[in-house]
Image (spheres, rainbow, N blue to C red):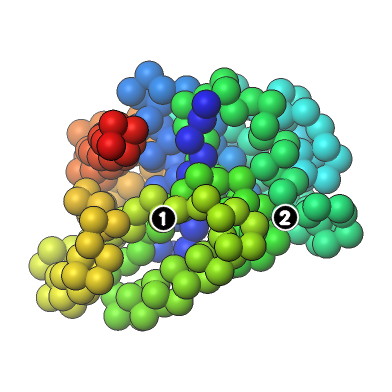
Amino acid sequence: MARVISIANQKGGVGKTTTAVNVAASMAATKRKVLLIDLDPQGNATMGSGVDKYDVENTCYELLIEEKAPEDVIITETSGKYHLIAGNSDVTAAEIKLMEVFAREVRLRNALAPVKDKYDFIFIDCPPSLNQLTVNALAASDSVLVPMQCEYYALEGLTALMDTIQKLASVVNPALKIEGVLRTMYDPRNRLANDVSEQLKRHFGDQVYRTVIPRNVRLAEAPSFGAPAMYYDKSSTGSKAYLALAGEILRRQKQALSA
């Protein structure tokens, strides 16, 4: 049965989609069966997977609104060697249509039920806002991975985000947990980044991943080539960091199961 992890932060520009694409590819490289769901109308995770968002027949819209079977919307050929449910501007229409349908908060959860046993991990790239699409993602997930930059405003917003996630969880998914907090675009030469990092560890403890994602040119370049960093430049520090993150997630899961 798949572990479903939403990658969410209401603040944009924190490396959310970069994390979604690269952790999915890293997990797939460990021979796990992985599905990535692009629930962001910008469709960046779709493009970063080597799939043209302007040329896909089916997206999350067809899954959520037209109730097409997952098998009919899943793309099996991607540059990251994982399966994909694409996203593009049609997903904006899905958010509007969701307001009109019955049991709108659990549409994604119900849609994924038939394929959960076919995957080890399902990652959901959420929009950078707490809208109806994000609510669907959280309702369908076992946990939430929160990427964030080590900046003052990001730290200030993180506590509010955690509070919001907990309130949403109590309504739509009481079993939802925080998977972890991931420090992204990290520059150890920056004193503020180091200060914020220490505050994070003091406040959130073990919820903060030991793995840190550095500022890395290759990570930034890879999406324009339609590939995760490990297939664009496997020797880059960014690629190695996401492989390390995948390993850390797997170790945590193993520890939780044996506890």
Q: In which quarter of the image is residue 252?
A: top left
Q: Name the residue under label 2.
A: 105
In the depicted view, which residue is nearer to us: 235 or 16? Answer: 16
Q: Is residue 114 left or right of residue 211?
A: right
Give residue 117's quadrant in the image: top right
Q: Where is residue 76 in the image (x, y as percent from the top left)?
A: 59, 22
Query: Above or below — where is 218 with respect to 122?
Result: below
The residue lying at 47 percent from left, 49 percent from top is: 143
Q: Is mark 2 on a helix, strand or loop?
A: helix
SS for tag 1?
strand
Residue 218 position within the rendered picture, expressed as x and y whole percent measured from the top left: 30, 45
Quadrant of the rendered structure where residue 80 is?
A: top left
Say whether residue 186 is left or right of residue 98.
Answer: left
Q: Position of residue 21 (x, y in %)?
A: 45, 41
Q: Which residue lies furthest to the front in this view?
A: 259
Residue 201 in the image: above or below residue 115: below
Residue type indicated by callout 2: Glu
Can residue 53 be seen in this snapshot?
no
Q: What residue type is labelled 1?
A: Ile
**Where is 214 relative to 27, above or below?**
below
> Residue drawn at (69%, 26%), measured in percent from left and top?
114
Q: In this view, does 5 lie to the left or right of 211?
A: right
In this view, 49 is above or below 175: above
Closer to us: 210 or 152: 210
Looking at the image, which is closer to me, 136 or 213? 136
Q: Can residue 112 be seen in this view?
A: yes
Q: Nearer the viewer, residue 238 or 120?
A: 120
Quadrant of the snapshot with the C terminus: top left
Please rate how many residues cluster around mark 2, counting C-alpha atoms within 10 Å: few if below 14, some from 14 to 19, many from 20.
many
Q: Mark 1 points at which residue?
A: 178
Mark nearer the N terminus (1 vs 2): 2
The residue located at (66%, 53%) in the rendering is: 136
